Image: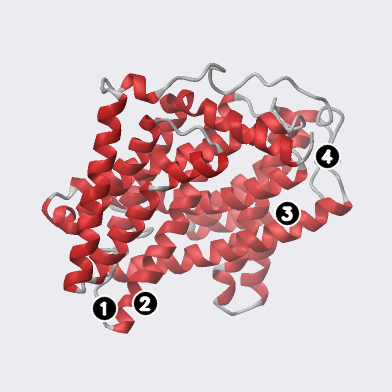
């Protein structure tokens, strides 16, 4: 704690406000339980404190730049875990070790996304230079992608460390965790059908989905005929995704109503329209497609979280936790998507092809992440009632699979 306090003071003197913010947040998380319980002995184990202070010690002892990526990210993951454990003990949230570890890994990616969004927003609104420091858009975007790689590696590494730690020490478990808590639900327990709210007949909804599939098939054929890789890949992948709801319903019995199928089909169809030229003609189109796609990712994340919640009695997620976890899931997925997009973009350029998924600089990346969050908020706030039947069925399948 003295290391963190000293770093905060030094940051104020040298005007390194990033270090000040990190130290203050870390101190709040470390000493929070001791203050709440009025017991100075209630602090995290030395192992976790060492990981939190590791970036500071690394910069002092090791004059390498390698640590600027992975080491701080590992510290960020540790802070995330400590925060998750603390809200488990001091709120209605109930977790089990494996779920806390998974949530920590996802939170690490989400915090990296949020941090860069805040940096970019401050630079745009207040003319600071946290991110937009005079370099080209492409150079800054590349640096952020490298940071995301470090964060991903550190998140996975931290997850492995924490998993084996919790196998030896069950600090996350307490008497409340073992209780079988009633499922109160983060949303109304009665499901609603999206198909009934679209003011379209079931037949018309299916016709619209089939029509978009036909257009995607034609786009795929056009890309094959003209040998244009972006059309070929985007239309082919999108067309394959449109058949996923039908396959899930036929092979696994997952209740995917026509409205949900139309939702998924529309998201990938709008993306393919963008790659066909609308991204260049209509700049807001990119924001629209990212928001729409994020709602699909948020829907999948919410349905999975709720299924785990119902299936596992020792896990209790209050409404605010379901909302937060859905947002974390989408932001983490957004980071993974941007990394995938960056890798495909660079690979295509190295091989002499037109980029299949082109990134247009840091502004494009940050705006994508912002609208990913918007899509997550829309689903978490208003769309979850349409996913109750899906998540209930997933929970039933988990119970049958594990014979519970």
| First-in-chain label (2 vs 1) | 2
Q: CB atoms at circles 2 and 1 under 8 Å apart? A: no
Residue 42: mark: 4
Farthest-out residue, left: 281
Disc 2 target residue: 347
Chain-order first, disc 1 or disc 3: 3
Q: Quadrant of residue 324?
A: top right
Q: Distance between the residues labelled 3 and 4?
A: 16 Å
Nearest to the observer: residue 167 or residue 128: 167
Q: Position of residue 393 (x, y in %)?
A: 60, 31
Residue matched to label 1: 353
- Image coordinates of residue 46 in percent, x first then y, are 82, 55
Mark 2 and mark 3 lie on one chain; the one further toward the N terminus is: 3
Residue at position x 42%, y 64% in the image: 340
The residue wearing badge 3 is 2
Whole-angstrom CA distance, mark 2 to mark 1, is: 9 Å
- Look at the numbered disc 4 and give the secondary structure of its residue: loop
4 or 1: tag closer to the N-terminus: 4
- Dot 3 or dot 4: first in sequence order is 3
How far apart marks 4 and 2 lie (CA) works out to: 50 Å
Foreground label between 4 and 2? 2
Mark 1 to mark 3 CA distance (whole Å): 54 Å
Residue occupying image coordinates x 81% and y 31%: 177
Mark closest to the chain's N terminus, 4 or 2: 4
Circle 2 SS class = helix
* Residue 330 horizontal side relative to residue 360, left or right: right
Residue 51 to residue 208: above or below: below
- Calculate the distance from the C-alpha at mark 2 to the C-alpha at mark 3: 46 Å
Task: Using the rendered image of the protein, determine whether residue 286 is visible from the camera's viewpoint.
Answer: no
Residue 170 seen from this side:
yes
């Amino acid at each position: 704690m003295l290391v963190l306090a000293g770093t905060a003071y030094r940051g104020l003197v040298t005007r390194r406000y990033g270090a000040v913010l990190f130290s203050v947040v870390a101190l709040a998380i470390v000493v929070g339980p001791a203050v709440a319980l009025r017991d100075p002995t209630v602090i995290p184990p030395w192992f976790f404190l060492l990981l939190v202070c590791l970036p500071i010690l690394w910069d002092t002892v090791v004059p390498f730049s390698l640590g600027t990526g992975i080491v701080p990210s590992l510290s960020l993951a540790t802070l995330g875990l400590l925060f998750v454990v603390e809200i488990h003990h001091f709120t209605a949230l109930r977790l089990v070790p494996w779920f806390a570890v998974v949530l920590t890994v996802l939170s690490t990616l989400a915090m990296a996304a949020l941090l860069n969004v805040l940096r970019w927003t401050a630079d745009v609104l207040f003319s600071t230079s946290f991110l937009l420091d005079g370099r080209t858009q492409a150079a800054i975007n590349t640096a952020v992608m490298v940071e995301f790689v470090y964060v991903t590696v550190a998140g996975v590494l931290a997850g492995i460390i924490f998993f084996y730690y919790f196998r030896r020490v069950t600090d996350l478990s307490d008497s409340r965790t073992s209780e079988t808590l009633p499922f109160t639900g983060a949303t109304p327990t009665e499901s609603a059908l999206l198909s009934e709210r679209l003011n379209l007949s079931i037949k018309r909804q299916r016709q619209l989905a089939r029509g978009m599939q036909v257009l995607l098939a034609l786009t795929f054929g056009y890309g094959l005929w003209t040998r244009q890789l972006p059309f070929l890949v985007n239309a082919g992948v999108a067309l394959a995704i449109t058949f996923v709801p039908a396959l899930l319903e036929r092979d696994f019995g997952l209740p995917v109503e026509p409205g949900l199928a139309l939702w998924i089909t529309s998201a990938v169809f709008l993306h393919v329209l963008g790659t066909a030229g609308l991204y260049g003609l209509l700049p807001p189109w990119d924001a629209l497609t990212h928001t729409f796609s994020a709602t699909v990712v948020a829907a999948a994340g919410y349905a999975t979280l709720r299924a785990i919640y119902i299936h596992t009695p020792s896990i209790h997620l209050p409404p605010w936790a379901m909302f937060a976890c859905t947002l974390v899931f989408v932001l983490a997925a957004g980071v993974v998507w941007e990394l995938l997009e960056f890798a495909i973009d660079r690979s295509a350029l190295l091989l002499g092809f037109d980029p299949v998924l082109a990134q247009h600089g840091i502004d494009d990346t940050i705006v994508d992440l912002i609208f990913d969050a918007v899509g997550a908020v829309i689903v978490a706030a208003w769309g979850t009632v349409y996913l109750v039947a899906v998540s209930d069925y997933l929970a039933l399948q988990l119970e049958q699979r594990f014979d519970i």
